[in-house]
Image (cartoon, coloured by chain):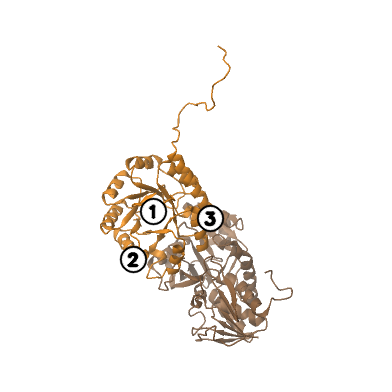
Chain colours: A orange, B brown
Amino acid sequence: MDIYGETFESRLMLGTARYPSPDVLKAAIAASGAQIVTVSLRRESAGERAGQAFWDIIRETGCRVLPNTAGCHSVSEAVTTAQMAREVFGTDWVKIEVIGDADTLQPDLFGLVEATRVLSEEGFKVLAYTTEDLVAADRLVEAGCRVLMPWGSPIGSARGLNNVYGLRAMRARFPDLTLIVDAGLGVPSHAAHAMELGYDGVLLSSAVALAGDPVGMAKGFRLAVEAGRLGFTSGPLAPRDMAEPSTPVLGLASFA
Amino acid sequence: MHVAVIGAGVAGLASAVTLAERGARVILHERSASLGGEAASWLAGGMLAPFCESESADTAIIGPGLGGIAWWRDRVPDVTTGGTLVLAPPRDAAELDRFAARTKGAGSRLDAEGVAALEPQLGGRFRRGLHYPGEAHLDPRRAMEALAERFVSLGGAMRFSSAADPEMAEGDHVVDCRGIAAGAAGLRSVRGEMLILSSREVSLSRPVRLLHPRSPIYVVPRGGGRFMVGATMIESSDPGGVTLRSAVELMNAAYALHPAFAEAEVLEMRAGLRPAFADNLPRVTQAGRVVTLAGLYRHGFLLAPDCARKAADLILGPEEGPESETP
């Protein structure tokens, strides 16, 4: 998986919030094989060094940190949060979320494009949490974004891929861009489905953190992401309407 | 045996009482000028809810937690054993199923009539719920005061405005119950924010947890028309005041539970820091004559009695006789 020119073996990114304990979080990260974890700056680490202990725990995992702007509802909030994240985490990566609707946590695409433009001009490498809207995707790419993160379904809804047609069209429209399904995945088969569509990776959070056994679920998703990727790269059969015999017909008795 | 206990939060009070009950001569040092001045315990919910907590906590807390309920009932007045009611707004009903599954059937399912039978004022507003009958709650401040009185009546000495150092404190043994201030290796802070409301209209007889996918909140009746609403969980050591966002979330949840909370008076709005280790479980450790009791996280009142017993066992040897609990 390519993120702004850096290559990662693992195609699974993991959120770090809402685990039963930091120990369970660490075990889940290990079981998932994730090399990139997201951290929400806004609340977990608000204020100078206030979240230092938790930040130390994240750093011990050895994962690359992708700060996000979760909970931001305006361009200026997102931009300020991204600037704080660059200071705190020492990275120019940022996952931009600008929430437009409090109930669905649907991204505000207009604010997202604007925040992406401002931050790209400041040298940030932006990963944009967006929908499968192709026009918005075009605008994000124009604004400097090279990693698009369309939703599978609303954040935390565990509904899987709501609009398979839209996600497939997005993959087809941007064959060379890194595309990662973010949000809405609930079970490993959802992740496998996204990977079979040709997505470069998936981002998971509550599906793992709130599972009865987060470590077991993390492993399940790791296997599903690998399975789905192999399904995509190994030339899958296209569906057809009629049966096709899978055993050889050679040597059958002839009654002609 | 002379023992110095440092820190008069719930851990220190429970330790001091346990040691005094078992015959030790105990001095309890508290750096504040009065009880609860800087203790996280003073801001606690006071829910004794081992089954509900096991939704997200290690199930290892259930046994010691049930022992904790019995301990409090034997020592302080006003421990209410009405269980816990767990509710969800209709559109978040899936959260109830998730909660029931995580707590492994410890709660019984309620329909609208069942909810109304337990909490008449919530009847008609919530059509489904869960009841955890084995759980209890207390008023943390009254409970701490009652423990302090019991400690003094057992011959213990309270020293306020006394910031004793565990290495320097006099006594054969020292129990370090300073919490965050102890600075134990691996101990971190989990910030929590809470409200205390006063309402003459709302009446509840047990803690109510309102499930929500993003901000689960509980309301605990304190008697006399007072209600504690808590609590946020933020990975931060920022001791500053309650943020507007947290206040809005807490207030929204109270309002969603009962619209009459809209007219409630906000008596208090405070933030505190919970000490926690990486597994969110408490530890009782010994180094020389100092026993350290730390990391009670959000389970101070639930688990302090068990931790206090372990600390006393380290100092006085395991308790003998029929009262001794299973290890």
Front label number (1 vs 3)? 3
Asked whether the residues under the numbered discs 1 and 2 touch, taking CB atoms below 8 Å apart as contact, a structural biologist would say no
Instruction: Name which of mark 1 and mark 2 comes first in the sequence.
Output: 2
Instruction: Name which of mark 1 and mark 3 comes first in the sequence.
Output: 1
Q: Quadrant where the N terminus of chain B lies?
A: bottom right
Front label number (1 vs 2)? 2
Q: Which residue is mark 3?
A: A215
Residue B73 point in image, percent of width and height? 63, 73
Instruction: Name which of mark 3 and mark 2 comes first in the sequence.
Output: 2
Q: Is residue A145 left or right of residue A53?
A: left
Classify mark 1: residues with Cα within 10 Å, few (<14), some (14-19) or many (20+).
some
SS at badge 3: helix
Q: Quadrant where the C terminus of chain B lies?
A: bottom right
Q: CA distance from mark 1 to mark 3?
A: 27 Å
SS at badge 2: helix
Q: Which residue is mark 2?
A: A87
Q: Quadrant of residue A250?
A: top right
Residue A105 tag number: 1
The three-letter amino acid code for the residue at tag 1 is: Leu
